[in-house]
Amino acid sequence: MNFKLKIWRQDNAQAAGKLVDYEVENISADTSFLEMLDQLNETLILRGENPISFDYDCREGICGQCCLFINGRAHGPLAHTSTCQLHMRSFRESETIYVEPFRAGPFPVKKDLKIDRKPLDEIIASGGYVSVNTGQAPEANATLIDSDTVEQAFDAASCIGCGACVAACKNGSAALFTAAKISHLFRLPQGKIEHKQRVKNMVKTMDKLGFGACSNTGACEVECPQGISISHIALMNREYFKKSP
Amino acid sequence: MYFTTDTATSPNAKIPEGDLKDKWSNFKDQARLISPGNRQKYHILVVGTGLSGASAAASLAELGYQVSTFCFQDSPRRAHSVAAQGGVNAMKNYKNDGDSIYRMFYDTLKGGDFRAREANVYRLAECSSHLIDQAVAQGVPFAREYSGYLANRSFGGVQVSRTFYARGQTGQQLLLGAYQAMMRQVHLGKIRSYTRHEMLDLVTENGLARGIIVRNMDTGAISRHAADAVVLATGGFGKIFYLSTLAMGCNGSAIWRAHKKGAWAACPSWTQIHPTCLPQAGNYQSKLTLMSESLRNDGRIWVPRNKNENRKAVEVPEEDRDYYLERKYPSYGNLAPRDIASRAAKERIDAGYGVGPLKNAVYLDFKDAISKHGKGTIVKRYGNLFNMYEKITGINAYEQPMMISPAAHFSMGGLWVDYELSTNIPGLYAIGEANFSDHGANRLGANSLLQACVDGYYILPQTLPQFLAQQGKANQPDSDSEAFFLAEQQVRSRLEGLCAINGNKTADHFHRELGKILYDKCGLSRSAKGLTAAIEAIRMLKKTFYEELKIPSVLNGINEELEKAGRVADYLEISELMCVDALSREESCGAHFREEYQTPDGEARRNDSEYSYISCWKNSGDIPVLIREPLHFEFTKPTERSYK
């Protein structure tokens, strides 16, 4: 297959960026999107040009490092699929494809398509855990948890931290990311005890870092590679307002 | 001559005295401690933030030590432990199926073909039970029965159910538990986390590990970090095969840098080739995705009985299918250990029975499981794996069998460590997949998550303080010293050298070429002839690498090609040692299958009288030096490993 590409190029965080045109030819339909970019990069390197910087690591949809905004959608045209799991068979022959970084105020572009997502780590650091030191744990089967509850907790816990929810949101809100962790831990008896503090601290941190407010458009849920439901946001909001004076 | 042997040096594994089941307790009873008030005076560097690094960093910080962590990813949560799918083994005996610490120990030792230390393996089994408690307390959502009790499943090479799992994302959930524990300590100011930093050298002074040199991958800045101890938790180097189940960034550079500074490598050629991965489909493929071994609980592996089978898989009748694992290994069947299952697949593929467009795969079929348990049960057990398979291949595996093939997966070999997880350089520790310790010549499924966690949560926090207590604070590390200055200079000139070559081939080109050589000659089967040819080919490739590499000449700022080139440069050296290691071991054991040493029915033929030792490799700057650590089996009797 052949494609025309319009790719965001930006030298560094301070520089202005722009879309640059490229063409790729003879790409197999079973090539993944990132492997297509690999091939383009090999050509650029051999021509003495700077290759395109983009994030990736596991290439099997679980590490959350890849983060391309393709044809106006976080992770491209397929729902619930990370960029690395997207293949060229999902595009039309000779299609023009726009490739940009995830855009949000708290995610500055480092270079080309690479962004800084440290704020997501800061949200977790402010409360996204159970405060248990190594060695303190009681026998695992001492607390029974019904399997439906565990499955619900798992649905939330499956977040890969890619930030597609933020990129898809017109407000640049991290509500789905934050709510997923709050909901995961709230549903389990081990996480319930610290729940009040956790909600307060994580929401406060999220706001402080400059993420926008959630206005319930549901765009995040559509793009989430793990299909995490916005019902977790409702839980977060309910629990947050319960605690406000 | 590819190596020399040093018989004068005998490695001290520091195995504690006493009966097998008392050794770890005896160690802990006698270990020297540091008082709570003094712990903050000690600074420990942890390189790598996967399951072993994050769990070690969190546990050490909880105890009160100052910890700095380094990872090349943009967040500690992305380390490749995240991709482990199937589960984690632990001896709970919840199934009442005859499990015990001894049985788990024996399964693991036998699975590794009696090429690991008894004491290490026993401790792994001993500590496994509490790990499940710890993970549950952190909020890891392990699968449960309807009654609310934890569920288990089986993995290869055992006859009990001791594998705990969280759908097909067990690694992710365990890693998030450790990552969150680590971020809690970051928040408390006990851990300083450096992301997007890659370790480029180890600094030693007077035979002690004193710190590391790292490169900030965003700015290109090189910095020095001095500390009382350095812990390498940098994972495996299976990516050396280019096509592997590993993440693109996984590499062997940190342990190789340590090796060049004097740390011994142990059994580097022992690589696990995983039997259930997606087959190679084209030349520009960048990885071979793993499909969890847990699928072999319900999937049946087969190839057609006829070489020129043209029918679709679903149209091939039972009598024309060869369920070769069930045929050859009736007592373990589809749950034969990984080395055996991979070799059996290769044997069928090489004999011309492979399936798929390149005839390089075998079928993994769920037809019988679906008709027995219903599709709903299979969806619940493996839904995300079936989805992943469909996303990558476009094939619905509920309707037709998956096509799978062996691919490089796990490094049993790594840096040599003693019972305390210390390398032979005092102050340098290696944990998780980066070390060689518990898995012998073949790792059992679901034991890697276990080993990473046990090393990080339970062993290192007990053993490292012993070293710190012996050292005291008299000899403060100083990053302005001569040793740091020299190490930094060397790092800078190496990077400048790579940028200056300005040839006409990319780093990936050399990596792919190296991968082909290794997979053919030092993969599922090896021979003296193949290995010597591989060594010559690698030397040639290394020569052309330094003449023809082309990367952008950017030192200050993001330069992925420079990162890749540095890793490939190290791979070109590691690969030669892998081949030498495989050449020196004239027997077959576990994943190391030498064609010259096999039984008449094609099984591995071990040679206990001559090769019951761990091969430790010392860097002499020229020809590698082999030092042998003999293995003593006091509590078990090595037997022929049979799964028939």
Image (cartoon, grey):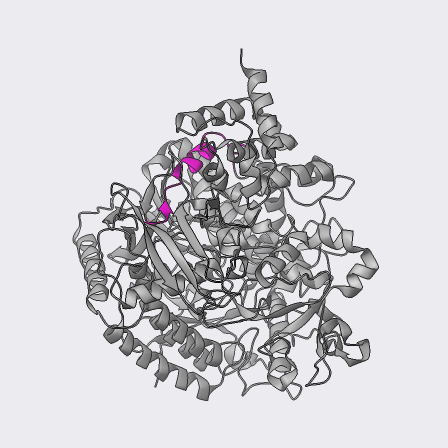
Camera-side residue: A149 or B624?
Answer: A149
Task: Specify whether B644 is left or right of B361.
Answer: right
Whether residue B345 appears in this view of the structure is yes
Camera-side residue: B160 or B428?
Answer: B160
Does B104 sit above or below residue B407? above
Camera-side residue: B341 or A242?
Answer: A242
Task: Specify whether B263 is left or right of B396.
Answer: left
Does B352 sit above or below residue B317? below
Percent across and percent down for residue B413 are 47, 67
What number of labels is visible?
A: 0
Percent across and percent down for residue B104 are 65, 58
Residue positioned 40% across, 40% down in the render = A103
Magenta segment includes A127? yes
Name the residue furthest right.
Answer: B372
Task: Specify whether B305 is left or right of B574.
Answer: right
Does B546 sit above or below residue B496? below
Q: Quadrant of residue B603?
A: bottom right
Percent across and percent down for residue B285 are 47, 67
Camera-side residue: B360 or B173?
Answer: B360
Whether residue B418 appears in this view of the structure is no
Task: Specify whether B20 is left or right of A163.
Answer: right
Residue positioned 46% across, 61% down in the render = A94
Residue positioned 57% across, 53% down in the render = B450
Percent across and percent down for residue B224 are 24, 48
- Give the residues drawn in magenta, as a range: A112-133
Magenta segment includes A201? no
